[in-house]
Image: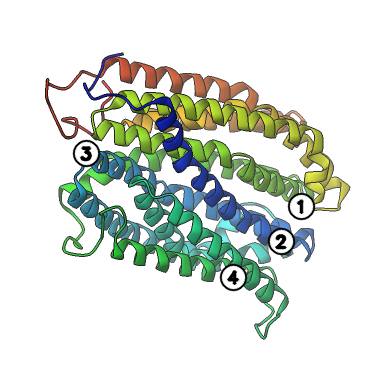
Amino acid sequence: MTSTTTATPLSTGARRKLVLALALPVIAENLLEALMQVVDSYLVSGLGDEALAGVGGALQVLFFLLAVLGSLSIGVSVLVSQVFGAGDLPGVARLARQALLLTAVLSVPVAILGYLLAGPVIGLFGMDAEVARIATSYLKVTMATIVVLVGLYTAGGVLRGIGDTRSPMLITALANVLNVVLAYALIHGSFGLPALGAVGSAWGTFIARAIALALMLALLVKGRNGVSIRGRGWRLGGDTSARIWKISAPAVLEQVLTSGAFLFLAAVIAHLGTASLAAHRVVQNAMSIFFLTGIGFSTAAMVLVGQSVGAQRIHDGVAALRLATRWAVGALAVQAVVVLVFAPQIMGLFADDPSVIGPGADALRMLALAQPFWAVLFVQSAGVRGTGNTRWPLVVTGSGMVVMVLLSYLAMRAGGGLGLTWSTGLVVVPVVGALHWWRFRRTVADRPAPPAGATGPHPDTQEVSP
């Protein structure tokens, strides 16, 4: 490995504290965010399988759009962490302002089109009439409020890029409490609020997240870690906007491929019946929780690698990535054992129909067996992104997920159930994770050292890969 600086590297203890200080709040924040969806699904499940399946179908569409638009925050976090690591605080502020403007410009048209096309899009799933009605109503509400959701991702991405993962965690905790109260009240008509049924959970979540976004923006205006979005630069365009789009575009395309593949899978499963779609939705809820630890450590790794690039201390980033990978693999392996043992009980928390619990438990077990490999994929791909290379994850992860879903489709066509459908991850995910591991090692080994006595960022902090 080529050294990139003569500065004394951080001690192992210091690296451990940095990784944990970033990762643990992200894990907690993501847990709280996932719990918002889990709570909504739990509350809606009391209305019956049709309501659960309808909300699940609508959320699948929403997750696709949020994954695509929200992936802007990946590029934002990478650039912010690199520029912050280089000590250019005014540059970080410019990036933050441009990122928030891009979020608004891109998400508003999507929200309008999504609202108008909600019915035809849900129609593609081939759902039963009542399920489709619930899904369409739910999707219209969430589409009309997608600007808030994407803005929340972008603001959080800026804060994480400057090393503040605690504030998004605390704000998300508050939003979670508000969501529980509002969703319950608007579903059942409590506390003087109207009874809206399943769509009430969508309104409750929107209000809670709108409050969270207002708090995050207020925090950025006030300033965190020397960075404030006050001042000039609220005009979209210029070199800063181009830099954000250059590094974010591959991340957006990656999410189009990945989320599009899973959206296709959900559409296929919907044709198997309401019970299968409801089970699939519960499995995805569980997956969103099981992966939180891996995603938390991957976020920490991406930020620390990015900051090490900007500060010309890449050896610190390499060591942080190694620690994050070990902890993520260990944590997800422990979770896998729990899921393997208690899969039926986990499904039973969200459904009491044996036709939902049985197939869902089989799928959960297959998902559990692949969890350690997912940990490697998450953290190593984050390390590659931290160097500024978002094109490699686009090609490798995007194509890998497409292959996995195609294999799942073939398994279903051959008469396989949900368990066999989800087992394809055991074939694809280890290969994708290994490719990311190889790419990061090659990037670091081939990166040239800066001139003797150089300070500040690497000549091209947007991409240090060869």
Q: Is residue 427 left or right of residue 412?
A: left
**Residue located beneath label 2 in the image:** 131
Q: Residue 395, relative to residue 49: is it above or below?
A: above
Front: mark 4 or 3: 3
Q: Residues within 10 Å of mark 3 (few under 14, many from 20)?
A: many
First in sequence: mark 2 vs mark 1: 2
| Residue type pointed to by label 1 | Thr
**Residue located beneath label 4 in the image:** 204
Q: Circle 3 sits in a helix, a strand or a loop, which is it?
A: loop
Q: Circle 1 sits in a helix, a strand or a loop, which is it?
A: helix
Q: CA distance from mark 2 to mark 3?
A: 52 Å
| Residue type pointed to by label 3 | Ala
Front: mark 2 or 3: 3
> At which x and y percent is residue 147?
42, 63
**Residue located beneath label 3 in the image:** 86
Taking depth in this image into account, of 315 and 385 the one nearest to the observer is 315
C-beta proximity under 8 Å, tags 2 and 4: no
| Residue type pointed to by label 2 | Val
Front: mark 1 or 4: 4
Q: Which of the 4 image quarters holds residue 322?
A: top left
Front: mark 2 or 4: 4
